[in-house]
Image (spheres, coloured by chain):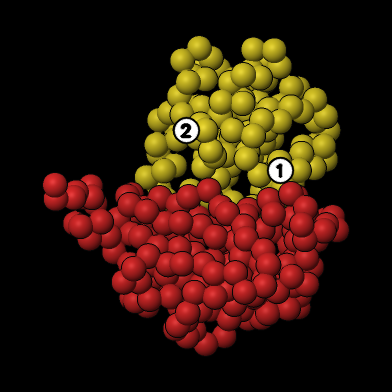
Chain colours: A red, B yellow
Amino acid sequence: MDASYITPFMTSIQNVFSTMFQLPVDIGEPSIKTDNTATHDVSGIIGVSGEMLGTIVLSMPKDAALSIVTLFTGMEMEADSEDFVDAVGELVNMISGNAKAEFQRKGVSISCPSVVTGENHRVSTPSGTACVKIPCSTDCGEVVLEIALREATAEDKEPQTRAA
Amino acid sequence: MRILLIDDSKTMRNIQKSVLKQLGHTDIEEACDGQDALNKVPEFKPELCLVDWNMPNMDGLTFVKTFRETDKTTPLIMVTTEAEKSRVIEAIKAGVNNYVVKPFTPDLLSERITETIAKCAA
């Protein structure tokens, strides 16, 4: 994957966490993720479509996610509450939107966020797309950004046809 | 002043509500998407709307275009993660009066709300 796809997400998570709740983020060494099993038990997921295709996942251990959401919202929440899911979704939405702006491409869209919780859940990425894990260290715990992005091809843009 | 907050994230509406309350605004209605907002406009008669862009059912840009068909003056502030220049221009052409990119600090949002109200009152 083009390294220029990764850097915007590093600055974006730092920007979102520091602007919204003054939480510094130390970025670790990115690595390639080789399976679809979620790194942690809370995943905020955004789909990317248009000129680029893929997924952006903010993966957090439950305890770290609870602490971060408390800082973000000013309220303590249960991990199975709608408000917790909403807050995690908004975090990954801001991180993705902020990074997308760096691409400066008109034809890239991001989806509304989805949030999945539970141990060992799986998040699939589009075929032919490498997934890069960006470890992020915070005072609330370690979280991971998982970026699986590629250029859309002509085949992606064409409607699927099937021979009769 | 009657203020309509339009965002599918309750978290974001709560953050915006807290900024508005600090500015002394308490007459606040909430909508979870553009369609919900259009349904609430006739009765609530907002004097200011804060609008997210990416929402299910009806996005913020469609809301702005539809709202502006009948109301050319009520100030609208887009509060969104869409930060590309082309998006800002698109929103302004559609009729928004000001633009705030998420993430924002409470001070920045507060400043944009105050300046928008002042400009539109002038």
The residue carrying mark 2 is B61
Q: Which chain does the residue under circle 2 lie in?
A: B
Question: Which percent across, then down, holds residue A73?
Answer: 78, 54
Question: Which percent across, then down, holds residue B103?
Answer: 61, 55
Question: Which percent across, then down, holds residue B114?
Answer: 69, 35
Question: Which percent across, then down, holds residue A7?
Answer: 45, 74
Is B66 placed left or right of A52 in the picture?
A: right
The residue carrying mark 1 is B10
Q: Amino acid at mark 1?
A: Lys
| Whether labels 1 and 2 share one chain | yes
Can residue B96 be seen here? The reply is no
Can residue A59 be seen here? The reply is yes
Quarter holding the N terminus of chain B is top right
Taking the spot 51% from the left edge, 27% from the top edge, the residue there is B63
At numbered mark 1, what does the secondary structure look like: helix, strand or loop? helix
Residue B93, disc: none
Q: Amino acid at mark 2?
A: Leu
| A149 up-or-down from A138: above or below | above
Is A160 placed left or right of A30 in the picture?
A: left
Q: Give the mark nearer the N terminus: 1 vs 2.
A: 1
Pick out the residue farthest to the left. A164
- Other-residue count near label 2 (Cα within 10 Å), few / some / many at <14 / 14–19 / ≥20: many
Number of marks drawn? 2
Taking the spot 51% from the left edge, 31% from the top edge, the residue there is B58
Is B106 placed left or right of B53 in the picture?
A: right
Taking the spot 41% from the left edge, 43% from the top edge, the residue there is B87
User: Cβ–Cβ below 8 Å for labels 1 and 2?
Assistant: no
Q: Which chain does the residue under circle 1 lie in?
A: B
| A17 up-or-down from B25: above or below | below
Pick out the residue farthest to the front. A164
